[in-house]
Image (cartoon, rainbow, N blue to C red):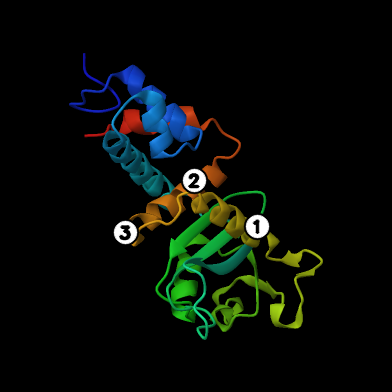
Amino acid sequence: MRNKYAARSRISEAKIREIVRYFAADLTALQTAQLSGLNRNTINRFYRALRERLLRACEAQRPMFGIVEVDESFFGARRVKGKRGRGAYGKTVVFGIFERDGQVYTEIVSDCSKPTLQGIIRGKVDASAVINSDGWRGYNGLVDLGYGHYRVDHSKDEFTRGRVHINGIEGFWGLAKVRLSKFKGLPKHTFHLHLKETEWRYNHRRSNKYKTLLSYLRENPVS
């Protein structure tokens, strides 16, 4: 009988469900290989296939509404002495959009310029939204695009002003860095998959990840 999760696979459906259960529980490939008795390379391939499906799911998410927070963060090696500011040497720059009481969206960017950041905002945030940001000049002109826009000025030690803050997206950055640190360094060519997995896990924090992952595989089996 055809395997509904993986075409032409030698792994049984029961074993695939076991792998997916471990992935949903956020176990590493090494831990899953040890528990399942399968080769680690086999688990790595299957984990990559799952992460590619999560990437597509994240890119297809709906626009964001309501109060939305935007911010950039830097992932990678420790800051090099003498190298400061946005785009610091050796760092991967990630832009994030956070919908309060909703979802988060992340994207690796080459820079934090106004055209780059606002291009993403226009594609992912509904025009009715109210945006909260810090004082970075890349956010200048959001009102001209039709958004409500409020800032907190971190340079003056201002981090909240009533409901004006970016605590939600900053909290997500902290969560993401803690989670990704368990991999003890990620190659640049796979970092985006792990980042989007972290985004997906946050957005599905209240859902059954195991059942959702199985539905992804039934719709698009591993080849």
Q: Residue furthest top?
A: 1
Read off the residue under disc 3. 189
Going by the image, does 70 lie left or right of 26?
right
| Amino acid type of the residue that numbered disc 1 sits on in the rendered structure | Gly
Q: Report the quarter where the C terminus lies.
A: top left
Going by the image, does 93 lie left or right of 139?
left
Q: Which residue is more in the foreground, 99 or 47?
A: 47
Read off the residue under disc 1. 171
In the rendered image, residue 107, in percent from the top left (x then y), is placed at 45, 62
Q: CA distance from mark 1 to mark 3?
A: 25 Å
| Quarter of image, res 186 | bottom left
| Amino acid type of the residue that numbered disc 3 sits on in the rendered structure | His
Q: Nearer the viewer, mark 1 or mark 3?
A: 3
| Amino acid type of the residue that numbered disc 2 sits on in the rendered structure | Trp
For the image shown, how many numbered marks are present on the structure?
Answer: 3
Read off the residue under disc 2. 200
Q: Residues within 10 Å of mark 1 (few under 14, many from 20)?
A: few
Give the residue drawn at x 34%, y 45%: 52
Q: CA distance from mark 2 to mark 1?
A: 16 Å
Going by the image, does 18 lie left or right of 181?
left
On the question of residue 67 being in view, the answer is: no
Give the residue drawn at x 48%, y 77%: 112
Label 3, secondary structure: give it: helix
Q: CA distance from mark 2 to mark 3?
A: 19 Å
Q: Residue furthest left?
A: 8
| Quarter of image, res 187 | bottom left
- Whether pointer 1 and pointer 3 mark residues with C-beta atoms closer than 8 Å, the reply is no
In the rendered image, residue 78, in percent from the top left (x then y), is placed at 51, 70
